[in-house]
Image (tube, rainbow, N blue to C red):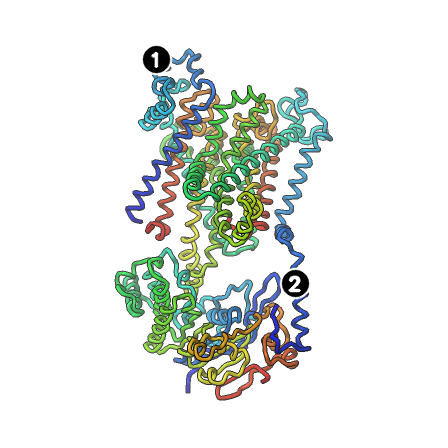
């Protein structure tokens, strides 16, 4: 019986702006079991990054607020916790890696300093021990000359190497869950593969779960066991990876899969690359019905009127659609 | 707003379609200037300062027409009196009415402020445009010059130039005119650097942009490109810089007059009033306070307005 | 910070000094009339001194030669003779320079001590009451001309309350603690005037810079590591926020010297600022030129120091 580590129930993270309330995450359910890799896909603006940051409560709270829902970490709701209690969970239980390695490291401190900071914070070690630990982490993520490079500054590393440093930093306290928010989007394709491989290696070594946020379906197919598809702040489909790619039920998911460029198929069948027409609706005052209605090729009157509920269409396979 | 694929063109589309036209209609009314004015209005202090400044300017321009006491009527029987109905701001050590002198001095301060700002902005825009349009050498030389000027200590240099050139200009333009020209040219001439940098930055960023290329392709000559396409974008930050220049010029002129090295002593500029008043601080503080308050309120309101303008016209700038 | 950077930066001082010397000399050369006509008509000036001055300034030589002579004289410390004070100009200046440096230095320290915490606090609580008050006070601070602030302080603390003396006396006949205490007492007002003026604009710079840094990605990273907010601010934000502030403070140094001149006048502090003014009022040209030169040099030195601090704060700079 898989142990559920993270259980997000009905999360609503909204933002107060001059033009009104932006409902970035509007009722999202998500769960991750120990050792799983779960992917969250969707296009820009669908709320996946906000969901990821909500887990560690890294949202700026004056404009943002938790309108509703729970974030259960090993049964304990994180939302009512204050900053001191959250700080015990950050990095030690749940760690996060961000999208932009070029700007995610502090330019005025050495990478060793920044990694050692985390180590020293959560384990009672002195400075030398923490720095040794930092060097060890760098070695672990395959940075050559780790002992020397521990004293280098972030600007002396390339993009891919900086992402490795971020991963090393995130894993230094051996968290149970790693949230990776588009970890490879800002990197070259060849480096992307290396980073994904590294994450896989780390996952096996530490037995941790990964919540992988991405908009690249190909990455999801390769690395995840389960996938959640988000659109305009809501979950529209959730399934084990084989089921999602084999039998996508939501028109949006189908569109996403169809829009993956397939050089082999194009060469054989001379197909046009399909894009989903239209753009994401405004999250300010979302329409009452299904949010994909305006772009859906199968739209009907019910879709526009009522929000369809998530229904189970197969083992572990849920869809928010009337079809 | 979202386009609709041919397959779903049906009667159910109206709610989404109806939402779109309303939004576009609302957006069309907000031209860039309207937006800027809206942003400016949100700064209550800036708006209040605008009102205050308008009152001050009105007082200075119309005041002397209504308040007809002469500025240099010496009356030793009325000397160093506190505020009264006859003399709302009291009298000075020669019995002259402080209010009248204050109003007169205000005209000079404002004139100096505006003129110096015009000099600074004109020189700055020209230099900046020149630097931005040329490449390599001229640009490098001009920027080196700007750096040099930036490290010159302004007040000492101002004092030095006035010290050396005051007599010559007096013979050329008369005592007041000479000092006016000198002060305006020097103050303005030491403040062109920020405007130059702003304009140059605009040029550098826009030079390669598409619409300039398009204008060039259509045969627009270089000056036309410059005037119609590039300069207007630099307008916002330059206006903000100009506002600050006015305030700085007023302070510079007041400082000079206070030190006794500005306008001739009989001209009641605000700085001069303070210089005269400082020896009577214990028995007639109202005199110094009136003069100082005039400078302070004018400069303060200009600074607040400048701040509001900065947010309105150039919301991404740092300071 | 690499040695290369240090040397390179030091070398840059030379063209800056040359530039300023050219500007000053040009101003002097363009000045109409003979700036030494005072000397010619002043009976107190011995003819040998007059001749020596004309020679050292090479007033009859072609322009570039005059410039070189003048520059050489300046660099050697031969700044001429002040007939007003009857001593060599360099002695005169060196006598009064320390006072100015102490006043300016103390004012800067005061400004930083006040502006840094206030600016950081205001930025971490943007648009709060504290922030709005701090912002408004900052505006008031740099809209008040230094001479007015000085007069106000004199009015309140010397005239009304009689707590502080407003005339600076370099010769205080007291010993031990009392000596220092009297010195401090008479320095409080000038230092406060200058310091508050500086501090006002510094508060706005610090606040603005912190606001910019606080929303950068690496600050979120720091929070995600479980570091408390206070440490995030003091360790990760402040050091990065100070970097542009250092540059801005350096750019302000010319204005600070201007403020110092005014402050010395009001409180009659015997520094080089008041020396400049009295020299101008007495038409003592060699002193005027020398003091201007010294002040300009000091500004360049301050820029140099600022660049070093900048490189120390930001490791990316030194690697270029």
Q: In the image, A145: left or right of C163?
A: left
Q: CA distance from mark 1 to mark 2?
A: 86 Å
Measuring from the top left, give residue A303's x and y in whole percent: 63, 80
Q: Quadrant of the N terminus of chain A?
A: bottom left
* Label drawn at residue A227: none
* Label drawn at residue C48: 1
Q: Are the residues under badges 1 and 2 in a single subunit?
A: no
Q: Residues within 10 Å of mark 2 (few under 14, many from 20)?
A: few
Q: Quadrant of the C terminus of chain A?
A: bottom right
Foreground tag (1 vs 2): 2
Q: Which picture quadrant has residue B303?
A: top right
Measuring from the top left, give residue A68's x and y in whole percent: 56, 73
> Is residue B201 or residue A5 the one in the foreground?
B201
A268 up-or-down from A144: above or below: below
B93 up-or-down from B142: above or below: above
Q: Which picture quadrant has residue A69?
A: bottom right
Measuring from the top left, give residue A42's x and y in whole percent: 50, 73
Residue C106 is at least partly visible in this image? no
Q: How many marks?
A: 2
Q: In the image, C225: left or right of B269?
A: left
B43 up-or-down from C56: above or below: below
* Label drawn at residue B24: 2
Badge 2 marks a residue whose secondary structure is: helix
* Marked residue chain, label 1: C
Q: Which picture quadrant has residue B281?
A: top right
> Is residue A316 or residue B88 the one in the foreground?
A316
Measuring from the top left, give residue B245's x and y in whole percent: 55, 39
């Amino acid at each position: 019986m898989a142990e559920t580590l993270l259980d997000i129930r009905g999360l609503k993270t909204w933002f107060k702006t001059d033009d009104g309330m932006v409902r970035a995450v509007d009722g999202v359910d998500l769960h991750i079991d120990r050792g799983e890799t779960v992917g969250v896909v969707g296009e820009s603006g669908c709320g996946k990054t906000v969901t990821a940051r909500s887990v560690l409560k890294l949202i700026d709270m004056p404009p943002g607020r938790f309108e509703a829902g729970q974030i259960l970490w090993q049964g304990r709701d994180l939302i009512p916790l204050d900053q001191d209690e959250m700080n015990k969970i950050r990095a030690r239980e749940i760690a996060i890696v961000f999208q932009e390695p070029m700007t995610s490291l502090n330019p005025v401190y050495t990478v060793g300093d920044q990694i050692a900071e985390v180590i020293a914070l959560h384990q009672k070690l002195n400075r030398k021990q923490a720095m040794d630990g930092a060097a060890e982490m760098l070695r672990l993520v395959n940075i050559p000359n780790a002992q020397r490079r521990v004293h280098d500054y972030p600007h002396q590393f390339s993009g891919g190497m900086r992402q490795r440093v971020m991963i090393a930093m995130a894993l230094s306290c051996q968290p149970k869950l790693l949230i990776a928010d588009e970890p490879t989007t800002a990197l070259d394709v060849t480096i992307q593969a290396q980073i994904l491989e590294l994450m896989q290696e780390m996952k096996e070594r530490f037995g941790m779960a990964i919540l992988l946020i991405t908009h690249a379906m190909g990455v999801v197919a390769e690395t995840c066991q389960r996938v959640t598809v988000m659109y305009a702040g809501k979950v529209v489909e959730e399934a084990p990876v084989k089921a999602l790619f084999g039998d996508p039920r939501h028109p949006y998911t189908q569109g996403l899969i169809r829009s993956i460029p397939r050089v082999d198929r194009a060469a054989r069948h001379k197909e046009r690359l399909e894009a989903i027409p239209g753009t994401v609706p405004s999250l300010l005052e979302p329409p009452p019905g299904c949010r994909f209605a305006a772009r859906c090729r199968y739209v009907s009157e019910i879709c526009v009127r009522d929000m369809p509920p998530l229904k189970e269409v197969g083992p572990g396979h849920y869809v928010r659609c009337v079809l | 707003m979202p386009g609709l694929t041919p397959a779903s063109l049906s009667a159910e589309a109206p709610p989404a379609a109806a939402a779109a036209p309303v939004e576009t209609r609302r957006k069309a009314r907000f031209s860039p200037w309207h937006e800027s004015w809206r942003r400016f209005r949100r700064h209550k202090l800036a708006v209040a300062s605008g009102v205050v400044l308008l009152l001050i300017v009105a007082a200075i321009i119309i005041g002397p027409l209504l308040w007809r006491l002469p500025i240099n009527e010496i009356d030793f029987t009325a000397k160093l009196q506190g505020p009264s109905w006859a003399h709302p701001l009291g009298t000075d050590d020669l019995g002259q009415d402080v209010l009248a002198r204050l109003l007169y001095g205000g005209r000079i301060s404002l004139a100096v402020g505006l003129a110096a700002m015009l000099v600074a902005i004109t020189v700055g825009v020209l230099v900046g445009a020149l630097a931005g349009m040329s490449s390599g050498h001229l640009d490098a030389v001009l920027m080196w010059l700007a750096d040099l000027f930036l490290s010159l200590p302004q007040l000492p240099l101002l004092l030095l130039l006035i010290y050396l050139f005051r007599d010559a200009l007096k013979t050329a333009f008369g005592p007041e005119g000479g000092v006016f020209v000198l002060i305006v040219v020097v103050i303005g001439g030491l403040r062109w650097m920020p405007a130059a940098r702003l304009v140059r930055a605009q040029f550098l960023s826009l030079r390669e942009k598409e619409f300039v290329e398009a204008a060039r392709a259509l045969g627009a000559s270089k000056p036309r490109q410059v005037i119609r396409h590039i300069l207007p974008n630099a307008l916002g930050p330059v206006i903000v810089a100009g506002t600050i220049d006015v305030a700085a010029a007023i302070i510079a002129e007041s400082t000079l007059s206070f030190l006794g090295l500005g306008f001739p002593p009989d001209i009641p500029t605000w700085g001069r009033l303070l210089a005269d008043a400082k020896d009577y601080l214990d028995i007639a503080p109202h005199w110094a306070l009136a003069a100082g308050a005039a400078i302070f309120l004018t400069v303060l309101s200009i600074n607040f307005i400048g701040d509001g303008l900065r947010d309105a016209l150039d919301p991404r700038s740092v300071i | 910070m690499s040695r290369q950077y240090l040397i390179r930066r030091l070398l840059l001082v030379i063209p800056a000094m040359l530039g300023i010397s050219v500007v000053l000399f040009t101003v002097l050369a363009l000045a109409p009339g003979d700036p030494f006509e005072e000397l010619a008509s002043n009976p107190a000036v011995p003819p040998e001194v007059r001749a020596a001055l004309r020679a050292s300034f090479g007033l009859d030589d072609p322009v570039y030669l005059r410039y070189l002579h003048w520059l050489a004289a300046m660099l050697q410390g031969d700044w001429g003779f002040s007939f007003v004070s009857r001593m060599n100009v360099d002695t005169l200046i060196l006598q009064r320079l320390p006072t100015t440096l102490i006043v300016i230095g103390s004012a800067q320290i005061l400004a930083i001590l006040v502006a840094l915490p206030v600016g950081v606090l205001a930025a971490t609580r943007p648009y709060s009451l504290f922030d709005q008050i701090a912002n408004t006070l900052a505006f008031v601070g740099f809209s008040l001309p230094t001479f007015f602030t000085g007069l106000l302080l004199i009015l309140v603390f010397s005239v009304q309350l009689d707590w502080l003396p407003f005339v600076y006396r370099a010769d205080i006949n007291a010993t031990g603690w009392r000596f220092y205490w009297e010195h401090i007492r008479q320095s409080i007002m000038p230092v406060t005037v200058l310091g508050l003026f500086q501090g006002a604009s510094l508060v706005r710079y610090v606040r603005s810079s912190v606001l910019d840094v606080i929303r950068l990605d690496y600050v979120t990273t720091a929070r995600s590591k479980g570091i408390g907010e206070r440490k995030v601010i003091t360790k990760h934000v402040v050091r990065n926020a100070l970097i542009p502030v250092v540059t801005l403070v350096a750019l302000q140094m010319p204005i600070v010297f201007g403020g110092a001149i005014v402050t010395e006048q009001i409180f009659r502090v015997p520094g080089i600022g008041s020396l400049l003014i009295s020299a101008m009022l007495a038409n003592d040209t060699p002193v005027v030129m020398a003091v201007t030169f010294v002040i300009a040099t000091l500004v360049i030195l301050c820029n140099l120091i600022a660049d070093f601090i900048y490189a120390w704060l930001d490791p990316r700079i030194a690697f270029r």
